Structure formats: structure tokens, C-alpha cells
Amino acid sequence: MKKTLAIILCLAMLLPMAGIASAEGTKGVINLYSFTTEISEMIDRFLKDHPEFPYTVTSTVIATTDGLYQPALDQALVGGGGDAPDIYGLESAFVLKYTQGDMSEFAAAYADIGIDLAKVESSEIAPYSVDIGTRPSDGALVALGYQATGGALIYRRDIAIDVWGTDDPAVVAEKVGPGMDKFLEAAEELKAKGYVAISSDGDLWHAIEAGAENGWLDENGALYIDPVRESFIDVAKAIKDNGYGNDTGAWGEAWYADFAGLGDKQVFAFFGPAWLINYVMAGNVGEQFGKYAVAESPIPFFWGGTWIAANKDLANDADKAAAVAQIIDWITLDDSDTGLQYLWANGLMNDAGTKDTVASGTVMAKSNGSVPMLADQNMFEVFVPANAYADGSTLTQYDERINSIWQDHVHQYINGNMDREQAIAAFKQAVADEFGIDAP
């Protein structure tokens, strides 16, 4: 095990490194671990704006590809010492493992390192971000997200006009929802005009997953299939059988081609937060740039996000703890015009002017979300209300893997390899085999 993790960590050193200060800090080094360069780029900006900051910040970036990040992070936290992460990023798919689950003991309480928790209220931080970052064992806030990732329907204006005579987001929202039954009715209308409603049923899964009232575990720790999540098996079947989608897979080449209208059939819509527009679609839509809009999703949901935690060992170094607190505060809680939240929401973090929905409601209220990708529609008018519906109470530390197992078995059914009952039974057995979690 140690040899394997050593190899992983060595490989990680070959990955792009970011967030290294131009001059060595006078007080030492702060170590950041993350799975993308996003946080390190934020810290680069922090260091640029705070030249007096007395620490060097070094970043270890290990992609989540093939599951490399979590084992490496776990090893580094358990091993401790000078190379252990002082700050670490946590993706929504596995954040609860580190804030409420098996690895939560390694996270420092924000209050213990000097972060002013009164700012959670004054900055109007999205409640689900706080819930996810709160450790149940002691009620301590140990992580916060910097994005707000409420989801919306991201649709083609030209297709909406052709089918319904308007691209007005309010009208489109009424055509496709609320609820999946209404969406499937809209899919039939789109089909009649030669379009498909979606590219991949995986696009819908994110909305359906987050729309559930309960998570994968019941109050006794047994496997539970919420009726909303179970409905995905029927929705996916309807999409497959009726030709409402292009039968692609999320993150595959065909999915990306559909952004630009280059797939088998023209795709009406995708489901996602602002980050899907900014960082995934915008650079891949080709001639469709400026032809999209956003409207309220048929089912309220959120998808993704990154939380920031600090190492409990910072309690042994008051100066470093205060410095780490300053960085985390600037990224997650500072609602001034010079904090990350404002800079990012208003497109001031890079030359491209990329805007995103952020966790602070205070910042969002004084920001403008007009973006060229959406023909200068103010996306905040849709995404800010969507963020209010986001609910982290259904998450578990097993979600990343159980979601994958569920989708695999749904596709076994819709592709004709199992009947519905067999697919559900096989899903339950697979979860029991992997996690020892039985269904009642």
C-alpha cells in the first residue's frame, strides 16, 4: 500500500503545478492539495493582491482520473508531517467523506484556526454549502464551497423558436416542466420537429438524483432507493425507446459534438450549473455560441462544487493557522469587492472575463451575470433562485460510487440485457458486495 501511494505521489509531481509564490515566504511553506488547478490559480491571485503574505504556497495537483486523488490525499493526511496538506480541495462527489465521514477527523474546525463564522450569515453563504461542510460529531464547520452550483435548463434558442415560437425563458420553463412527465411531453413535441430533447440520459440523472427527498441510505444505514431516483430507470427507458436523445454518454466525444450541433440530431437542451456553461460548453459550441439561453429546470437540483478544508494539525502552529485562515476567508467568505467571490462573479479573475455563480448571496446581489455565450442573458436571474433550492441533505460519502453502479444497471435494463426487476436486484447486490450495505 505504501509503495502504491508513493508511486501515485511521485506521478502527481509530474502533473502541472500551480500556486507557487514567486519568492520564498519568510515564515515557511503552506501545502495545498487539489484535483484541479482551480484553487491554486485562486491562491495565485490572492498572493498577487497580498504581496506582504509571509508564506510560500506550493500545490500538489492530482487528477481524480482513475481514482488517484483520494488515496493520495488520505495517505498524506494520515502520514502528517511537513509534507502533509495544510489546505485541501474536496469535490462534491466525495466531500462528505472528509467533512462528515471516515476522514472527517483530520479537518480543522474553521473557528479553531481563526475564521470568523459570523461572516457565514453576513455574506449570505448558500445554506447547502454550510450543511455539507459541517461535521456532525461536534457541529463544527470544517469546509465551505466557493461556488453555488444550482442547476438550470441550458437550451438552444433557435430550436425553442422553431418548436414553440419563442425563446423566452419563462415560456420555455412552462413547456418543459415542472416535473419529468412534462419534460417528456416536451420531448415528444421536439421529436415531431426532428429534434432530440437531450444528448445523454446522464444529463437528466444529475437533476433527478438531486431532486430526491432522501439519500442512498436510510436512518438505519441500509440501502434506500428514493422513488425520484428510481423513476430514472423509467425516464431513461422512455428516452431510449422513443428516440428523445442521441444516446451519447456524458463527457464523451459525441456529447461534446452535440454542444455544437454536430451530432446525429440537433439537441435542444443540457442540464447543468453555470460552470457547465463557462468551462465545458463555451469552448466547444462552435457556431452555436450566443445561441443558448437558460431557464428554470423541470426539477430543482445542484451539480458539483468544490469545498476547502484545512488540516487539524494547524493547531500546532498559530502563525500558519492564521495564514491559512486568511486564504480560506478570502476565497469563501470575503464579500468585499476585492475578495474572490466578487472577482469571480464579475469576471475579474482572468482575461477571458469568465463569470460564475458563487456561494455568497451578498455578492450575487451586487453582481451582473450577463454572458456572451447566452446572448448576454443575465444567467444569475435563473441560477440564483436555483441555488436556493439546492439541498445537500441527501448526500452520503458513498454517492460517487453508488451513483455509478445505479446508472450501470439502469443501462443494463434499457439496453435489453436485464428486465427492470433484475436490474434493481442486481444493483442492490452490487452495493452489498462492494460496501456491505444491504437493502431492507
Image (cartoon, grey):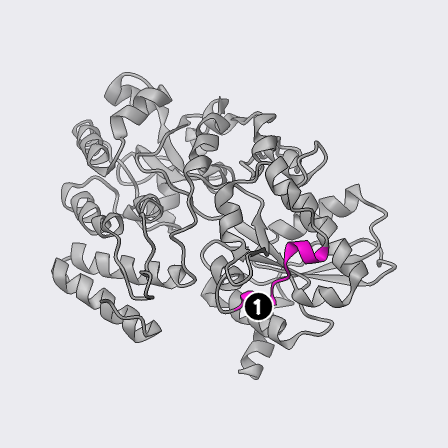
Quadrant, the C terminus = bottom left
Q: Is residue 146 above or below residue 141?
A: above
| Helix, strand or loop for disc 1 | helix
Q: Which residue is the extreme one toward the top?
A: 165
Left or right: residue 320 versus residue 224 is right
Q: Is residue 191 above or below residue 83?
A: above
Number of marks in the rendered image:
1
Figure quadrant of residue 109? bottom right
- The magenta stretch is 103-113
Q: Nearer the viewer, residue 213 or 139?
A: 139
Indicate yes or no whether the magenta region holds residue 213: no
Residue that appears at 24% across and 32% down? 195
Residue that appears at 20% across and 67% down? 426
* Residue 163, percent from left and from top: 24, 22
Q: Which residue is the extreme one toward the front?
A: 138
Mark 1 neighbour density, 10 Å: few (under 14) some (14–19) many (20 or more): some
Left or right: residue 220 versus residue 124 is left
* Residue 92, percent from left and from top: 48, 53
* Residue 41, percent from left and from top: 67, 48
Majority secondary structure of the magenta segment? helix
Residue that appears at 53% across and 68% down? 103
* Residue 168, percent from left and from top: 36, 19
Residue 20 in sight in this render? no
Indicate yes or no whether the magenta region holds residue 109: yes
Q: Is residue 151 above or below residue 320?
A: above
Residue 198 in sight in this render? yes
Q: Badge 1 is on which residue?
A: 105
Q: Nearer the viewer, residue 347 or 366?
A: 366
Q: Amino acid at mark 1?
A: Glu
